[in-house]
Amino acid sequence: MKTLTAIFAALCISAHASTPTSIKLSQLYDEARIVGVFEIIEGKVVSPRGQWCGARYKARAIEGVKNVSPGAVVEVGYLPYLKIGSSYLLVLGEFEAPPPTIKSDEEFRATCRPLLPANTIMGVWRGAMEVEGATSDQAKRSTWTVRLPGYVDYPLGTRTTQVNGEKHLWFTDLVKRLTGER
């Protein structure tokens, strides 16, 4: 019985250790250099000598939330699944190496860092949230919703809605809570 209990405890500990932990969006916001809604206008994969480093994008600010004005174009790295032409609420900070399962921190810094932009998506890529709605029309800003990535804790009380059977946050309410407005 003790052996079975020890095996069960070891499985629980290893399963817990491999489970990603949640990050508070408010903490990412506080630590971010730039936060805004951006349309991805260009992107390319970065893979020197066949080694995967991610992607680099050009993004145009549609809505400035923190340290960015509408119309500004920034280079962003390095999450490889952003869609050209789509809009995202991006929480951007300084260079952040990927999880060690991809490459060691040292290897990534030596091989990839020189090829990627300074603005990186924070929270090990969880700071990229797709925005649904007519983002090209500022008059419809109150109808924008934000798709939730996994393992992010949102400010309590943020209004939600269902979009195609998926829970989304109301953009305007989320921004009010992040910036301290009530």
Image (cartoon, rainbow, N blue to C red):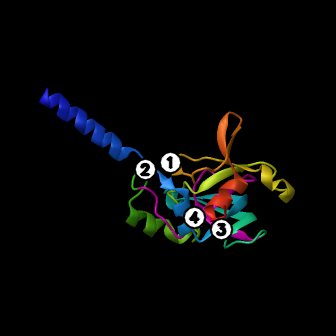
Whether pointer 2 and pointer 3 mark residues with C-beta atoms closer than 8 Å, the reply is: no
Residue that carries the numbered disc 4 in the rendered image: 29
From where the camera sits, is residue 83 visible? no
Residue 12: x, y in percent?
Answer: 29, 38
Q: Residues within 10 Å of mark 1 (few under 14, many from 20)?
A: some
Residue that carries the numbered disc 1 in the rendered image: 151
Q: Is residue 8 above or below residue 123?
A: above
Q: Residues under labels 1 and 3: Cα distance? A: 25 Å
User: Bounds of the magenta span?
Assistant: 72-99
Residue that carries the numbered disc 3 in the rendered image: 75
Q: Residue at x 50, y 65 (%)?
A: 112
Whether pointer 1 and pointer 2 mark residues with C-beta atoms closer than 8 Å, the reply is: yes
Q: Residues under labels 2 and 4: Cα distance? A: 17 Å
- Counting residues from the N terminus, which is met first, the one under dot 2 or under dot 3? 2
Q: Residue at x 65, y 37 (%)?
A: 166
Residue 146: x, y in percent?
Answer: 68, 49
